[in-house]
Image (tube, rainbow, N blue to C red):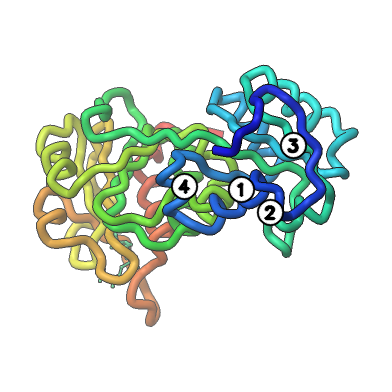
Amino acid sequence: MSEQRQGAVKQITSHSNPIVKEIKGLVAQRKHRSQSGLFVAEGLKLATDALAAGWGVRYLAIGTEARDNPIAQKAAATAKARGALILEVSTAVMSAMTRKDNPQMVVGVYEQKILTAKDIEPAGTGPWVALDRVRDPGNLGTIIRTVDAVGGAGVMLVGDCTDPFAVEAVRATMGSLFHVPLAKVSKDAFKALAGKWPGTVAATHLKGSVDYRTPQYAEPVLLVMGNEQQGLEDDMAAACATLIRIPQAGQADSLNLAVATGIALYEIRRNQLEL
Ligand code: SAM
């Protein structure tokens, strides 16, 4: 981390400032995120969500356009009180740190939080979703957002998954990253968890013989989803009591992973969700 006093305010107008370089490194490379345990989330909404949910914040960069915005000012005051360094950056520096198509007024750098298998205690009613080697950050972010929407308990990342703290994944969660517990588990740890899971363990599978609308799902459900290209590995499918399938018409081989997850989750939660 750069040598800067936390809980202070710093003006930055130069692209070559070391903190700007550090933030760009966190956006660009998983290695930097893993080594530092930090990640970047763009936008005022995500800053508000992160701060309200009590996530650790290292930097909050505020662009020129946001200086007079009361919500941004409140976010900056909260972050500063929690020890973050507040960066007042020029428009040019802000656009160098965020996406070009939709420049943001606020960029935050937060501390990663991820559970391990031993932290997972299946209880309550909300489903967990286990993802086998999910590759696409947009799919992962969308699934986290959907798990949040159905009142899910969390998302397990099984095996070699895309980084949930990549800026594209974070963006796709639309803030749900800060509300849905995430866990990283090995395949063996997943099988052990599935073996003693107290509710229904249901995997979606293109060879599933059970229509996803027919099981009596016992809470808490563990919904298991396969990889985008290869589907679910055989040994993982064997660890699941029920293989469910979503019927399809037309010529598509399969549904998009995030779409299939959403369809299954809404069926699983059919009797719990009301307008
Ligand atoms: N070629 C892959 C295969 O053979 O499984 C396609 C994978 S699909 C894009 C990604 C995941 O979404 C699947 O592993 C499964 O979990 C889920 N999925 C997609 N369409 C489905 C369907 N019609 N029924 C059940 N699961 C489905």
Quadrant where the C terminus is found in the figure: top right
Q: Amino acid at mark 3?
A: Leu
For marks 2 and 4, the one nearer the N-term is 4
- Residue 262: which numbered mark, if any? none
The local crowd at label 3, few if under 14, some if 14 to 19, many if 20 or more residues have their Cα within 10 Å, is: many
Q: Is residue 172 above or below residue 49?
A: below
Q: CA distance from mark 1 to mark 3?
A: 11 Å
Residue underneath mark 4 = 33
For marks 2 and 1, the one nearer the N-term is 1
For marks 1 and 3, the one nearer the N-term is 1
The local crowd at label 4, few if under 14, some if 14 to 19, many if 20 or more residues have their Cα within 10 Å, is: many
Q: CA distance from mark 2 to mark 1?
A: 7 Å
Q: Amino acid at mark 2?
A: Met
Q: CA distance from mark 1 to mark 4?
A: 10 Å
Residue, x 32% and y 38% (percent of image)?
A: 183
Residue, x 55% and y 36% (percent of image)?
A: 110
Q: Is residue 172 left or right of residue 15?
A: left
Q: Is mark 3 within 8 Å of ligand 1?
A: no
Residue underneath mark 2 = 97
- Residue 23: which numbered mark, if any? 1
Can residue 172 be seen by looking at this rendering? no
Residue, x 63% and y 21% (percent of image)?
A: 83
Residue underneath mark 3 = 87
Can residue 68 be seen by looking at this rendering? yes
Q: Secondary structure at mark 3?
A: strand
Q: CA distance from mark 3 to mark 2?
A: 12 Å
Asked whether 21 or 159 is in front, the reply is 21
Asked whether 236 or 98 is in front, the reply is 98
Q: Secondary structure at mark 2?
A: helix
Q: Secondary structure at mark 1?
A: helix
